[in-house]
Image (spheres, rainbow, N blue to C red):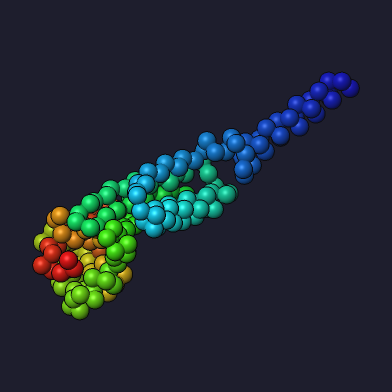
Amino acid sequence: MKLILLYVIIFLLSLILIFNKYSIGDDNIKKEYDIRIKYPNTNYKDLNIAINNIINKYEVDFKNNILNMNIGYYLYITYKDYYYKDFISIIFNISYFSGGAHPNYYIETINYNIKTNEFITINDLVKNNNNLLYDLSNISRSYFKKKSAFNNILDMLYEGTKPNINNFSKFTISKNGFTFYFERYQIAPYYYGEYSLTVGNNIVKYY
């Protein structure tokens, strides 16, 4: 009888250990996914708020998606910043895996004028040049068509470089001009990676 009772106790303890290992919110489960985030802390309150909003958006979304899935999942965020004249430009590269065939990659950008305390978006650039979207569309198509890798995916290239706001909404400002970023799937299949195109101030004509 004591031997049977011992077996029952061992069995129940095993169930408890298994449940604790995979239960949501348990400390052990936190070791099953990885979050690594790097972002700048500037001297400008509004800019810091905008930065934190981007970081929080991806972190909250990631944690919500791993409530029932966790092993091997990760969220990595890195950044690169540019300082030019009165502008601070930041690009965030987000690598996000919460299941599926491959990780997802995203790009976010912020452009901030420290003198006027204003954020610069593609809408602001277009205000100074009504033909800007058409110019960017033509320039980007001409540029990428020269690359042999795009020979068989011109339809995708043309779709992702149509003269609309969304296609050119991610950009940074630096001494080299304006760099526009194209996420995976925008102008080419996923495995092609991400692309960017830098155009001079003579094209954008913002400052």
Residue 32 vs residue 11, the one in the foreground: 32
Residue appearing at x 19%, y 61% in the figure: 178
Residue 138 vs residue 156, the one in the foreground: 138
Image height of 47 relative to 39, above or below: below
Q: Is residue 10 left or right of residue 106?
A: right
Residue appearing at x 25%, y 63% in the figure: 187
Residue 134 x %, y %: 18, 75
Q: Is residue 171 left or right of residue 33?
A: left
Which quarter shows the C terminus? bottom left
The residue positioned farthest toward the front in the image shown: 115
Which quarter shows the N terminus? top right
Residue 19 x %, y %: 67, 38
What is the count of numbered marks?
0
Is there any visible trace of residue 125 in the rendered image? yes
Residue appearing at x 29%, y 67% in the figure: 121
Q: Quadrant of residue 24?
A: top right
Q: Quadrant of residue 88?
A: bottom left
Residue appearing at x 18%, y 68% in the figure: 206
Q: Quadrant of residue 152?
A: bottom left
Image height of 55 relative to 116, above or below: above
Residue 125 vs residue 132, the one in the foreground: 125
Q: Is residue 40 left or right of residue 137?
A: right
Residue 13 vs residue 25, the one in the foreground: 25
The residue positioned farthest toward the top in the image shown: 3
Is there any visible trace of residue 163 in the rendered image? no
